[in-house]
Image (cartoon, rainbow, N blue to C red):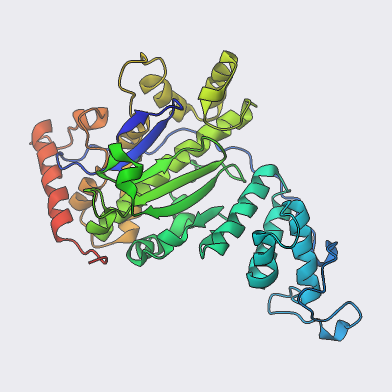
Amino acid sequence: MIEKSRATGWDITVYKIIEVTCSGGGGDDDNGESNPPNPVDDGFDDPFNEGSFGGGNESGGPGPNNPAEIDFNDTGIYTAPILRLNIIGELGELLQLGPHTTPQMQYLLNDASTDEVVDLYNYVEEEQRSNEVKNFAKAAIDAWMEDGEVDFVEQIIIDNDFLNTSCLKSVYDDMGKVAKFKEYLQNFEPSGSLATLRFTADNNFGNNNQDYTNAMAITIPPLSSNEIIIAFNTDSNTSGNILDKPDVFKAVAMIHELLHVEMFRKMLDAVRAAEISGNNLNWANWTNEQFYYDFLDSLENKYFGIFDYFTRYKYGIPVSNEPNDWQHQQMAQHYRNTIKKVLTDYDPTLTIAQKEALSWIGLNEANIKAWQNLDEDPNLDTQQEQNAITTLISQIKNTFTNECN
Ligand SMILES: [Zn+2]
């Protein structure tokens, strides 16, 4: 819930644990927003028809005159080296990777699996070769070079740092990854190659995010490109260190950050729809005041829920005032039911009261309206409800399983 303006004028939103709370208010998950149109899928060309690369000598293998040596794998994709080389050559040109001596080309030629090469090629072709697609493709190669993982369907890069933190990665896997999460948010994400997402873990989180040392994670908005980053706090010198927290806290942190991601995606979509210069959320660079109004119009038309909260809590705030937590305001009011649904699937043994308490993590802040107005139990006043939730959060924190231990 901590949002602080940076030099860019944009918020970095953070998630932190605060041990003061109440009992649950009912959220309303219907955000009333419309889905953006799906991108046109015009199919893609077969990779083996696309070859134009001439460097077939580098790794030997059968040539075009030895068709008998060309074979197929289980999926029917040609795997003969010459075809692989053709695909790599095509990728090199499409992505402007430079001569075959560059590190990225060397990786593709010598180290990449054929699956990686084919997946990369199909992704670039299916997504119609936009600049953003090419940028993600290049980032994918870089990720592989550093032993990361790439999900082309969801456009997610999982950094090696996150992968290697196995007790964190396992919670992500247990939750069904982002694909599963999206099922809960059918009206809540623009489709297509709008934004890409990176999962990383930062064991120097305290130095890199000095104002947020008690946060379990941080979501960095797409300020200079369309990449959104979720950085998990694995810094043992900080109170937010997620490795100290029970697994169910890690699950809540992931849901929470993914809600931020979807909000940023929608905002990015509104920017794109308004055809605003720069095409990212760094509005400090918007040179024309009209861009700002175009953005608000676009946001209002496409994502009224976000427009509503953004203008209510953010827009028009005097410069010297503390920036508002509009994303957390919206989450606390409208998305705690979603959080509870995800938790139900993640751990069916959680009680209703536990899920209610967990859904408030990161949102039980003094400035959050839904928290201030908490009044679910007719037998308790707001303060008593908040205290009950805070107590239960502490209890869960101290007693639930932490696979990192
Ligand atoms: Zn947050």
Q: Which residue lies furthest to the right in this view?
A: 65
Q: In this rendering, is residue 297 above or below 78?
A: above
Residue 385 horizontal side relative to residue 128, left or right = left
Q: Is residue 152 visible?
A: no
Residue 253 horizontal side relative to residue 268, left or right = left
Q: In this rendering, is residue 200 above or below 109?
A: above
Q: Which of these two is toward me, 137 or 24?
A: 137
Q: Which of these two is toward me, 301 or 310?
A: 310
User: In the figure, residue 86 lies in which quadrant?
Assistant: bottom right
Q: In this rendering, is residue 210 above or below 129?
A: above
Q: Where is residue 242 in the image (x, y as percent from the top left)?
A: 28, 54
Ligand 1's quadrant = top left
Query: What's the residue at 48%, 27% (across, down)?
Result: 304
Q: Residue furthest bottom?
A: 68
Residue 125 horizontal side relative to residue 303, left or right = right
Q: Where is residue 381 in the image (x, y as percent from the top left)?
A: 9, 32
Q: Which of these two is toward me, 206 or 26?
A: 206
Q: Is residue 62 visible?
A: yes
Tell me the quarter of the image containing the N terminus: top left
Query: What's the residue at 25%, 27% (across, down)?
Result: 369
Q: Where is residue 171 in the image (x, y as percent from the top left)?
A: 35, 62
Q: Position of residue 388 (x, y in %)?
A: 11, 43
